[in-house]
Structure formats: C-alpha cells, structure tokens
Image: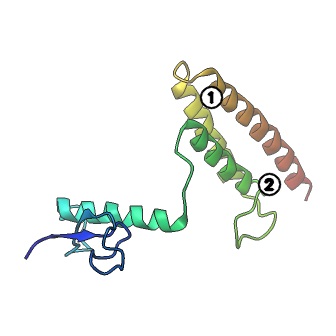
Amino acid sequence: MSDERKTDGNGGASGNTPDSNASTETRKDCHNPTASPETATDNDRECAKQKAEEQASKMGKMPPIDFSTLAFSLATQALVHMGQARLPGQPEGEVNLPMAKQTIDIITMLETKTKGNLNETEARLMQNLLYDLRTRYVQVAKRTQKD
C-alpha cells in the first residue's frame, strides 16, 4: 500500500472533482497523526506541515512575515496588556502591567540584539514603538495607582 496519493490541490483526491484538468500534487497520507515529536517520522512531519498549510489557506491570505510584522505583533501584545487594545472575548480595559512591562522588555531586547542589522526604516520603527509603548505604560501605571 502506498503512502502517497494524488490530490486536486484542495485536499481532495484527484478524480473526485468534476474538473479532470485540475492540477495535482503529491500528498502524503497520515497514518499516525498523534505521533510525538520523538517518534514522528518524516511522513508525519510532512503531513503536519501540509495540514497547517491547508488550515492557513482556509483562513485566508496572511501578510508575509518580516521584521516589522514581528515588531507590530509584540507591540500589540503590550497594548492589550495595558488595556489599550482588546482581544475578542476579553473584558474592556483589562490591565496586566507586569505582562506589559515584560513585553516591552522583550521588544527592547530585540532592538538591542538587532542593532546594526536593521535597515533605517526598521530601526526607526523600533525606536518609535518603544517610545510610544513606554509613554503609554507610564500613563497607565499612574492611572492604575490612582484607582
């Protein structure tokens, strides 16, 4: 029995679609979807990668990952912890200053470790993000001390 089958590019087996000219790609069958990292075979890893790619394509196109995307993602986390941004299902204005500080410290560490390796735009982005986050942190900390 073969571990490979042809698919129509959308996860369905070829021949199951009315369009006989559909592009095909080789896809591994998953025989052990619950394999642990220690016992996973190359086939298990390839299957997991394909499933992740299929899930991502179902969710829509995501922007490419670059340094700015990482920096904005971390900054958004800090804003959420300061109650300046909200996640779906999260109570409005929930503040967690220790987590906000830790996230700002992570961004600071990232800026320090990448110094000299960033282009001008990325370096300016880090400076501006950190200035804004630190300013907001001080404002939120003062406001929560008064409450």
> Which residue shows up at 57% across the image and 26% down it?
112
- Which is nearer the N-term, disc 2 or disc 1? 2
Query: Quick check: can you spot residue 92?
Result: yes
Q: Is residue 147 above or below residue 22?
A: above
Residue holding disc 1: 122
The quadrant of the image that shows the N terminus is: bottom left
> Which residue shows up at 78% across the image and 37% down it?
132
Determine the image quadrant of residue 93. Answer: bottom right
**In the image, which disc is placed on residue 88?**
none
Q: CA distance from mark 2 to mark 1?
A: 23 Å
- Nearer to me, 9 or 122: 9
Q: Mark 2: give few (<14), some (14-19) or many (20+) Cα within 10 Å.
A: some
Measuring from the top left, give residue 101's x and y in whole percent: 68, 45
Q: Is residue 18 above or below residue 113?
A: below
The quadrant of the image that shows the C terminus is: bottom right
Residue farthest toward the left in the current orientation of the protein:
1
Judged left or right of residue 120, residue 20 is left
> Which residue shows up at 56% across the image and 22% down it?
115
Residue farthest toward the top in the current orientation of the protein:
116
Residue holding disc 2: 84
Determine the image quadrant of residue 3. Answer: bottom left
- Nearer to me, 135 or 114: 114
Amino acid at dot 1: Glu
Q: Is residue 13 above or below residue 80?
A: below
